[in-house]
Amino acid sequence: MGGATALILSGEEMPDRAVFTMNAVALHPRTRGTVRLASADPQAPPLIDPRYFDAPEDISVLIAGLRASMDIAHQSPFAACVTRPYLPATDNLDALDDAALEEHVRRWSATAYHPVGTCAMGTGEDSVVNPDLQVHGVERLRVVDASVMPTITSGNTNAPTIMIAEMAAERIGAHLG
């Protein structure tokens, strides 16, 4: 993914020249983070620990993605526009070994803003809602958002979330009718 903009730290850092961004994304990360209550106060922000890279395979996937991005940047028409990469700062991409790329991944990786699974649907011990989106053990409470997806989709979560909402509306309507 990428574009004719600087996607650096979610826009917190602005480069001093024209740039385009190419990103490597782990579509199916093995690492699983946590979301926990900070206190009994419903206004208190939750404790979110993404636990990035707890699974070493995730680093390997992103290093391979970076190498693919660098290869694409060497091809026409990109090659004519790339004077040097913004990150990691080097004049010789070919000199970057896996250790340097891993350091880059660990320093600059961030969320892709598509979290799912905090209220995963299923029938197992770790699931929160059943296939009708009813919270296990709680009457008359459903969860209807991307958090019920047990795993992340390979694309944007918007369309599947709409589908979940439409399914929930049908089931709730049938239950009330």
Image (cartoon, rainbow, N blue to C red):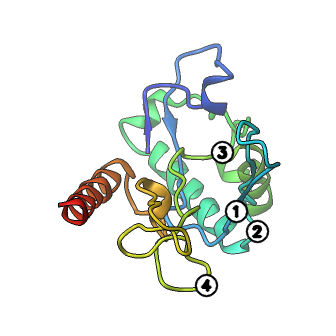
Provide residue 160's location: percent of width, then percent of height.
Answer: 32, 57
N-terminal of the two: label 4 or label 1?
1
Q: CA distance from mark 4 to mark 1?
A: 17 Å
Give the residue furthest to the top. 16
Give the amino acid type for the residue marked by disc 3 in the picture.
Ala
Give the amino acid type for the residue marked by disc 2 in the picture.
Asp
The residue indicated by pointer 3 is 110
Q: Quadrant of the C terminus?
A: bottom left
Give the amino acid type for the residue marked by disc 1 in the picture.
Gly
Q: CA distance from mark 2 to mark 3?
A: 14 Å
Q: Which mark is residue 125?
A: 4
- 51 or 170: nearer the eye? 170
Q: Is residue 83 above or below residue 23?
A: above
The residue indicated by pointer 2 is 54
N-terminal of the two: label 1 or label 3?
1
Residue for point 73% across, 64% down: 53
Give the residue furthest to the bottom. 124
Q: Is residue 69 above or below residue 34?
A: above
Residue for point 48% across, 43% down: 73
